[in-house]
Image (spheres, rainbow, N blue to C red):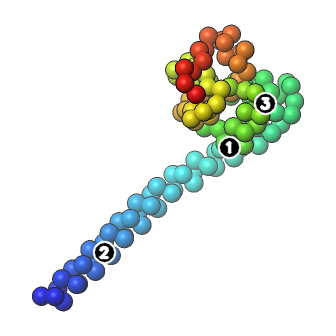
Amino acid sequence: MKRYASNFALRMAASCLLTIAISASLVVAPAASQTTPASPTAAPAPSASSGNGAASKATTKSSGAPTAQDIASAKAGGKVWVNTETRVYHKGGRWYGKTKKGKFMTEAEAKAAGYKGAKRD
């Protein structure tokens, strides 16, 4: 009886590990495909912060989530993150650059476009 119990325990452990490995590979595969489209948008970001004409193009950017480099350069440039779904802008904090749909712009541009400041940042 003890031998059966140990075999059963080993089989269950192996089954669980296999399930976890398969689940992890399914989770990692989409993340890898999402980072590929982000890399072309990461290349224009440094040039957007260097020139005045290019900076206005960066403020209208509304594609996927920004990279950490995009967020750092926008924060250094005094930009706010505008959540285009809720029409609220964030000067910093938890949601700065993290909402699904949004873009960077100056606070004056955000106010002129009718966006409201976040109550909590």
Going by the numbered disc 3, the residue's amino acid type is: Gly
Q: Is residue 5 above or below residue 97?
A: below
The residue sitting at 68% across, 10% down in the picture is 112
Element on which disc 1 rests: helix
Circle 1 residues within 10 Å: few <14, some 14–19, many ≥20: few
Residue 6, x across and y down, in percent: 22, 84
The residue sitting at 31% across, 74% down in the picture is 13
Residue 58, x across and y down, in percent: 74, 29
State if disc 1 and disc 3 touch (CB < 8 Å): no
Q: Quarter of the image containing the C terminus? A: top right
Q: Which residue is mark 1?
A: 68
Q: Which residue is mark 3?
A: 77
Going by the numbered disc 2, the residue's amino acid type is: Ala
Q: CA distance from mark 2 to mark 1?
A: 39 Å
Q: Is residue 64 visible?
A: no
Q: Residue furthest right?
A: 51
